[in-house]
Image (spheres, rainbow, N blue to C red):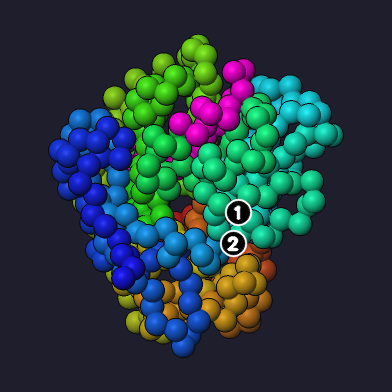
Amino acid sequence: MTINYTKIDNCRVCSSNHMDDILSLGIQPLTGVFIKPDQQDPIEAPLDMVICNECKLVQLAHTVNSNLMYENYWYRSGINQTMRDHLAGIVGDINSRVNLQAGDLFIDIGCNDGTLLAALDVEGLIKIGVDPSDAIHSIKDPDIIKINSPFTNDAVENKLQGRKAHVISSISMFYDIQEPHKFVETIVDFLDENGMWVVEMNYTGDMIKNCGYDMISHEHLIYYTMSVFEELIAPHGLFINDVSLNSINGGSIRIYVGPKPGETENVVSLREQEKEQGLDKKETYLQFALQIEVSKKKLKKKIKQIIDAGERIAAYGASTRGNTILLYCGLDHNVILGAAERNPLKYGLVTAGTRIPIKSEDEIRAANPEYFLILPYTFLNEFIERESEYFENGGRFLVPIPDLEIIYKKDGKIIHELVN
């Protein structure tokens, strides 16, 4: 019998069994799954968060069987120009810190469709992509060594043949790891003594500040602060050397890790900032839960007003994070006429639990809905530019996070109007 999900008894970082509930988004179908119209919805699992009273790690209270989430993985890094530019920027940043040369080894964990590896333009560089999902099959570059597996010693060792990596990157995936200590042990095994591990992931501080409850999904098990991450890697002889924040995916943290001590002022400053924000306090997250509820009520009220006025709404983007919003707010095919999507693999499918048909952007545009509900709002600027004709024809964007707003064009200017 397949076990779909289990409730955790101990903290994933410090193993304490003293954890408190902080919020619940209810029981939802797997948020990263899209299905055919004649298929049943995927299994449901709770989206509940707890905080560890010992190390202050915020994490999901349940772990879903990873095979159910990654066998058919729909996200592709290269779909939007914003993400392509961002990943190229990470490569540029790495090149400014590490003098990569022919024969050096670069490992990208969670490589997805290989967009980051493709941006590495160093002749003779050995590039390895590791990913357990089917997204890795999108990589056609013969110079990229593909490992279709989780990042483990057994999976990687044969490919490295005793070599050590000068750079290891793990972008938007480390928070998916159920056993982070084992993962870090493997990093230590394969990282050169002068090597660098670059970790980027959604940042809990931004999630709180921006009311970004869409960051919460079944695959994202852990919601790190820098301070908790530092506590995780310290026993393994690793150190945070530098850190930076950026706006990608609603707010992310990029951490530069190495086997030698030495930290920048950025690290010192962010430690203090996290304390000031109260990211180590249960009360901060209880307040976040209240803000989420207010956000939900405002969005549902506005959508009801739009529907009652005889106007139509389509979703812009069919994404894992968008599914969290749709499911939590109870927005289904009865109120959302369809979801405009760029990834052709999703055309003809429906969103799990809400049954919203997914179509191409052109097909949804042809229906000329009065509103687009922007689900991947972190790409908002790109979408505004892309939909200039839609705005010219009187179309409007409804953006749910961080503050509910309507975006439209008036007298040749883009207007952002907050909804009270």
322 shown above or below 106: below
Quarter assignment of residue 4: bottom left
Q: Secondary structure at mark 1?
A: loop
Please tell me which residue lies in front, 336 or 169: 169
**From which residue to which does the magenta span run?**
185-208
Task: Spot the residue most to the bottom.
Answer: 38
| Mark 1 surroundings within 10 Å by alpha-carbon count, few (fewer than 14), some (14 through 19), many (20 or more) | some
Is residue 173 visible to the viewer in this orientation of the structure? yes
Quarter assignment of residue 345: bottom right
Position of residue 414 measured from the top left corner of the image (x, y, whole percent): 58, 56
Please tell me which residue lies in front, 293 or 61: 61
Q: Residue at x 64, y 41 (%)?
A: 158
Name the amino acid, label 2.
Answer: Asp
Name the amino acid, label 1.
Answer: Asn
Q: Are marks 2 and 1 in contact (CB under 8 Å)?
A: yes
Cα separation between marks 2 and 1: 8 Å
Q: Residue at x 50, y 34 (%)?
A: 186
- Where, quadrant-wise, is the N terminus in this rendering? bottom left
Which of the two discs, 2 and 1, labels the residue nearer the N terminus? 2
Q: Residue at x 60, y 33 (%)?
A: 168
Is residue 48 visible to the viewer in this orientation of the structure? no
